[in-house]
Image (cartoon, rainbow, N blue to C red):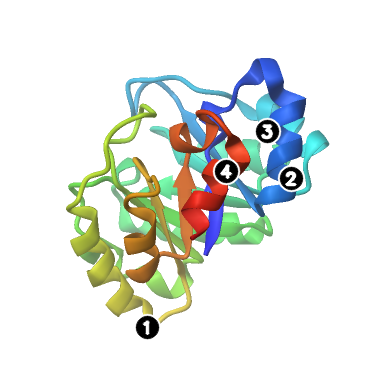
Amino acid sequence: MILAPSVLSLDYTRFNEQVAILNKAVSALHFDVMDGHFVPNLSFGPDILKAFKKASNLFMDVHLMVDDPGFFTPVFAKAGADGITFHYEAVKDLKAISSLIQEIKQLGLKAGIALKPATDVAVLKPFLKDLDLVLLMSVEPGFGGQSFMPSTFAKLETLTKIKNEHSFLIEVDGGVNKENAAKLIAGGVDILVAGSYVFKGDILANIKSLEK
């Protein structure tokens, strides 16, 4: 299991200190990019990612919660992303989804699709052979600190069965904590994203509690 702390919750007044802890404790960082349109919140742009690249060699997992992921993909690729995940709901045309997956791969990055809680995993069937990652949102995207939606477990079970025919990883993001982490891992999750839980209090102890 890979833990990818969401840097949306990092204390930026303690940037160097907290990144140093993460560099020793995890192998990936998760970047929630929000445009204020696809979700009702704004987060950060490519310059923040560039700053992390200077301070860390960890895998940079970029999650685009934006209306136009095709526009932002090359921007964040240039800034240092190692993987880019965009929302199925943001690209309605199936050909456009396939094209964007291929563009991400041609840029040398891992390609993923994210699903909102209400979106059925069946919509991914045409793309699974080309995906490196499927991200299940276990809260409504847009804000940190929300409670985990138990309905995620049913979607995870369905996706795990499909996964046996392909080679993608399963990532879950939203409300992850020590109470649900073990069940998610047992259910087949490869990557856990946790923000508020990791950065409240002792970062290292919180990370270790998720890995048990």
Q: Which is more N-terminal, label 3 or label 2? A: 2
Give percent across and percent down for residue 183. 32, 62
Badge number at residue 23: 2
| Residue located 19% across and 63% down the image | 154
Q: Which is more N-terminal, label 4 or label 2? A: 2
Specify whether residue 188 is in view.
Answer: no
Single out the mark in the foreground, 2 or 3. Answer: 2
**Residue 13 falls in image quadrant:** top right
Residue 128, relative to residue 19: is it above or below?
below
Mark 1 Cα within 10 Å, few/some/many (few <14, many 20+)? few
SS class of the residue under badge 1?
A: loop
SS class of the residue under badge 4?
A: helix
Q: Which residue carries the number 4 mark?
A: 205
Say which amino acid is labelled 4.
Ala
Q: CA distance from mark 2 to mark 3?
A: 15 Å
Q: Which is more N-terminal, label 1 or label 3? A: 3
Say which amino acid is labelled 1.
Asn
Q: Which residue carries the number 3 mark?
A: 49
Q: Which is more N-terminal, label 3 or label 4? A: 3
Mark 2 Cα within 10 Å, few/some/many (few <14, many 20+)? some
Q: CA distance from mark 4 to mark 3?
A: 25 Å
Single out the mark in the foreground, 4 or 1. Answer: 4
Give percent across and percent down for residue 71. 53, 36
